[in-house]
Image (spheres, rainbow, N blue to C red):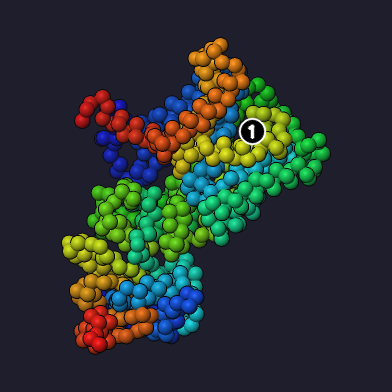
Amino acid sequence: MAREIGDVILKMEGISLSFGGVKALTNISFDVREHEIRSIIGPNGAGKSSMLNVINGVYHPQEGQVTFRGEVRRDMEPHKAAKQGIARTFQNIALFKGMSVIDNIMTGRNLKMKCNVFHHALHWGKARAEEIEHRKKVEEVIDFLEIQNIRKTPVGRLPYGLQKRVELGRALAAEPSMMLLDEPMAGMNVEEKQDMCRFILDVNDQFGTTIVLIEHDMGVVMDISDRVVVLDYGKKIGDGEPDEVKNNPDVIAAYLGTSH
Amino acid sequence: MLYREAGQFKASYEADQQIFPILQDRIGVLLLIGFFALAVPLFADQYWLKAILIPVLIFSLAAIGLNILTGYAGQLSLGSAAFMAVGAFGAYNFMLRIDGMPFLVAILLGGLCAALVGVMFGLPSLRIKGFYLAVATLAAQFFIVWALVKIEWFSNYSSSGVITAQEIEILGFAFDGPQSKYLLTLFVVVVMALLAKNMVRSTTGRSWMAVRDMDVAAEVIGIRLMRTKLTAFAVSSFYCGVAGALYAYTYIGTVEPEGFNLDLSFKILFMIIIGGVGSIMGSFLGAAFIVLLPIALDVFVPMLLGDLVSSSFVSNLQLIVFGGLIVFFLIVEPHGLARLWQIGKEKLRLWPFPH
């Protein structure tokens, strides 16, 4: 493997998040190291997606602090997280349905574009050069994900598996240093899952992108993760390498239930 | 057969990202512009120019403005007519109060006034969406018309806020006949439509559509919601404002604030719904449809029914047929005339062969 797991780049300390009386997350701490694949697992409603939303600033926790690359914060705006190099995909595909695949992936590069609305209106010189330069990058992403044949199709017309892939492409286009993937393989058949796993591993390997992954397929999680965090009812019940977690009695109880 | 892109290979991204990537489209657009710029002024009579072509062009521009806001950026607005009024009164005041003000600069400044006002009334869009936003823009509609009547300075203290547009003169040439006014309108509208097309196919347009389709995802990939929405309001209102200035200067001549009422806002909304939401060409088709349909009914209904019915019945019947046709079109093609055109183009790729 080309990648080498580095230092801790993201540290969550004592995160608590509640919506009114509902406690989504209670006092959760864990960390993510550079270049690793870190999975978050847990039964439905355990607070996994909420955790991702805290990391990239969609939700603001009531307690605790997040340290990303040395910068300590309680909460932040999502676009600032994007600027710091955190990209993400969503559990229910959040593509821009009315736009083509190319345009969707192009939006992923918006932070790297400098032209303003007046340049765009004229679409001459600088704006055109910029558009072409970024189109090249987008085509690289399209090649990487092997979706050349659908590049001009409106995403609303694509099957589910491909939409998930395009969404990964949009996140990749931003050249993030960390990607949060929320159930990238939900609802896929075995073949599509294998493809998606390969893409995730390739991204991690080739670009060194740190990956935080939520996934329900235990086979996949145990295979590709470096470390796994287990949540249940908003509390952390396990943390460690896949083998360690697999044999943790609390985790087994949460997933299989216990006899009373 | 006639409309096939087969064989047109793109060897560079530049070629693939042209404003009209398909050769037939480029030829078509050039022919259309040539026809309307050269042939029409020669052959069309005064009535056609004054009562049909000029208003179609002006409403197309206003519809493009609303389409940018509603069709591309997804922010519902019922204030387009008010922004037109700001443009018209803005241009009037610049012409009136600054000596030697060039006409084109005046209408652009009028548009800028509208853009400023649009941004102000766009602020609620940061908190509210959909129908609630429509209600907020409705407030703009009533407030602006009221302010233009109430604050007499805007109409230079004329009674009930009526203004009479000054003569248009550019570089010593007076635009006083319908032909020259038509050409001036055509020029402004074509240039602004092309600029709009450029905007919607670049990052600005993609950000608008991203906010329209999924605002949370847009924010997560780094699109600033506030900036994007307010830009859409500014550009949209600018287009409406320029349309309003043209409405006063090249079409009606004498306007009052009440002329820019809610009816007109709804009319522009109908134009983009019938023409095609989120389509620059749809704005032209919708404007043509809404302007031409009542005129066509005016001609054909009495012709068909003749002396059988009274004239008041005929005028009521026209309203009924007008409404009925709109409903019919929306059922047949909910995505508007632009979509019909799209389907037609796809059919034309094969026509006249069956496969």
Seen at 39% across and 54% down, the residue is A96
Q: Residue at 63% of width from left, 34% of height from top?
A: B246
User: At numbered mark 1, what does the secondary structure look like: helix, strand or loop?
Assistant: helix
What's the amino acid at mark 1?
A: Tyr
Q: How many marks?
A: 1
Within the image, what quadrant is residue B51 found in? top right
| Residue B181 as seen in the image, left or right of residue A83 | right
Give x and y (percent) for residue B267. 57, 36
Give x and y (percent) for residue B318: 55, 24
The answer to whether A235 is drawn above or below residue B177 in the figure is below
Quarter residue B238 falls in: top right
Residue A148 visible in image: yes
Is A230 or A212 nearer to us in this picture? A230
Above-or-below relation of B327 to A249: above
Q: Quadrant of the C terminus of chain B?
A: top left
Q: Residue at image x 38%, y 44%? A: B17
Other residues around mark 1 within 10 Å, as few (<14) / some (14–19) / many (≥20): many
Side of B277 relative to A200 (left or right): right
Instruction: Tell me if B166 is positioned left or right of A157 in this view.
Output: right
